[in-house]
Image: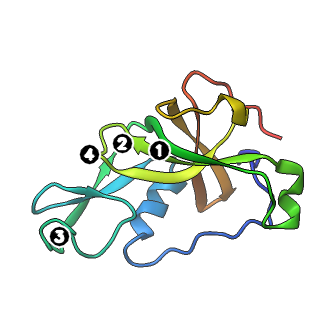
C-alpha cells in the first residue's frame, strides 16, 4: 500500500450500482470512464442513462491516465482539522486524454500551488486507502511525487 497524500479523517467515497466498476478499476490502479454502448458518448461521473441518447447500455473505457488541468482552486482553509498541516492544497478538474471531453475532479499533488496553471499536463497517481480502495490524484507530467 502506498503512503497517503491526505489524512485518514478524509471522507471516503461511497460506491453504488453505477460507480462500482469505476472503484473496482481504481483499486487495480486503472483509470476508466463510462462510455455509452449506443452512441459512444463518454461520461464521468458514471450514471445509469446516457445524457446524449438516453440509452441504458454502457461499457467501460480504460484511459492512459494523462490529461490537462481544465480549472483549479487553491484551498487555504481546512474543512477538517486534520487538513490544517496540508494547507494549501489544490483541487482541480482534469480534462482526460482520450476521454472524449470528460473531466474528473481530484487533487493535484506534488506541485506547489504557485506552479499550477490551466492546461498544465498531468498524470494520474494513486492514493491507496486500503486493499480495496484507491483514489486517483494527479501530478504534473514528469514529476516524481514526494509523499508526506
The quarter holding residue 145 reads: top right
Q: Which mark is residue 94?
A: 1
Q: Which of marks 2 and 1 is in front?
A: 1
Q: Nearer the viewer, mark 4 or mark 3?
A: 4
**Disc 4 target residue:** 100
Q: If you read the primary sequence from the N terminus, does the residue marked by circle 4 or circle 1 appear first?
A: 1
CA gap, disc 4 and disc 3: 18 Å
Mark 2, secondary structure of its residue: loop
Q: Residue 69, how many percent across, how many down?
A: 49, 38
Mark 4, secondary structure of its residue: loop
Q: Which mark is residue 70?
A: none
CA gap, disc 2 and disc 1: 13 Å
**Disc 3 target residue:** 57
* Circle 3 Cα neighbour tier, 10 Å, few/some/many (<14 / 14–19 / ≥20): few
Q: With respect to residue 63, does 43 lie above or below?
A: below
CA gap, disc 2 and disc 4: 10 Å
Residue drawn where x is 50% and y is 51% of the image: 28
**Disc 2 target residue:** 63
Q: If you read the primary sequence from the N terminus, does the residue marked by circle 2 or circle 1 appear first?
A: 2
* Circle 4 Cα neighbour tier, 10 Å, few/some/many (<14 / 14–19 / ≥20): some
Task: Judge left or right: residue 107 versus residue 98.
Answer: right
CA gap, disc 2 and disc 3: 19 Å
Mark 3, secondary structure of its residue: loop
Task: Judge left or right: residue 107 versus residue 71.
Answer: right
Residue toward you, 100 or 2:
100
Q: Which of marks 2 and 4 is in front?
A: 4
Amino acid at each position: 500500500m502506498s503512503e497517503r497524500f491526505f489524512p485518514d479523517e478524509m471522507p471516503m467515497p461511497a460506491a453504488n450500482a453505477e460507480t462500482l466498476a469505476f472503484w473496482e478499476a481504481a483499486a487495480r490502479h486503472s483509470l476508466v470512464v463510462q462510455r455509452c454502448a449506443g452512441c459512444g458518448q463518454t461520461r464521468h461521473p458514471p450514471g445509469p442513462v446516457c445524457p446524449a441518447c438516453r440509452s441504458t447500455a454502457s461499457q467501460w473505457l480504460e484511459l492512459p491516465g494523462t490529461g490537462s488541468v481544465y480549472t483549479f482552486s487553491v484551498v487555504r482553509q481546512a474543512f477538517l482539522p486534520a487538513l490544517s498541516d496540508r494547507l494549501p492544497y489544490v483541487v482541480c478538474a482534469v480534462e482526460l486524454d482520450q476521454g472524449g471531453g470528460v473531466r474528473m475532479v481530484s487533487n493535484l499533488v506534488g506541485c506547489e500551488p504557485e506552479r499550477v496553471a490551466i492546461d498544465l499536463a498531468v498524470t494520474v497517481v494513486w492514493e491507496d486507502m486500503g486493499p480495496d480502495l484507491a483514489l486517483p490524484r494527479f501530478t504534473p507530467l514528469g514529476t516524481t511525487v514526494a509523499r508526506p
